[in-house]
Image (cartoon, grey):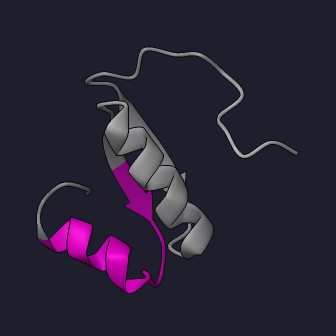
Amino acid sequence: MPDYFPAFLDLRGRRCLVVGGGAVADRKVHGLLQCGARVTVVSTALVPALARLVAAGRVE
C-alpha cells in the first residue's frame, strides 16, 4: 500500500483526530500538521516526538 493519505482534502484549520501515540501516529501527525490541520491525539502513551509536539502546544 502506498505511503500517503488516500484523499485530497484542504485541511487548513480543520480539526483532525489521531488515535494512538506510536511511530505510525507520529508520521500521520506530522503530515497533518504540514497540511495546516489542528491535530488532537488520543493515546495512553506517546513517543518522544509526539510528546514534544504536545509540550510545544502544536498538538492537543
The residue drawn where x is 45% and y is 64% is 42
Residue 30: give x, y in percent of width and height.
Answer: 40, 52
* Front residue of this view, candidates 50 and 34: 34
- The quadrant the C terminus occupies is bottom left
Farthest right residue in view: 1
Q: Which residues are magenta?
A: 40-55
Residue 25: give x, y in percent of width and height.
Answer: 54, 63
* Residue 39 visible in rendering: yes
Residue 19, quarter of picture: bottom right
- The quadrant the N terminus occupies is top right
Number of numbered discs present? 0
Q: State yes or no: residue 51 in magenta.
A: yes
Q: From the viewer's perspective, is residue 60 above or below residue 12?
A: below
Q: In the drawing, does residue 13 fall left or right of residue 22?
A: left
Residue 11, quarter of picture: top left
Farthest front residue in view: 2
Q: State yes or no: residue 48 in magenta.
A: yes
The residue drawn where x is 12% and y is 60% is 57
Q: From the viewer's perspective, is residue 54 above or below residue 34?
A: below
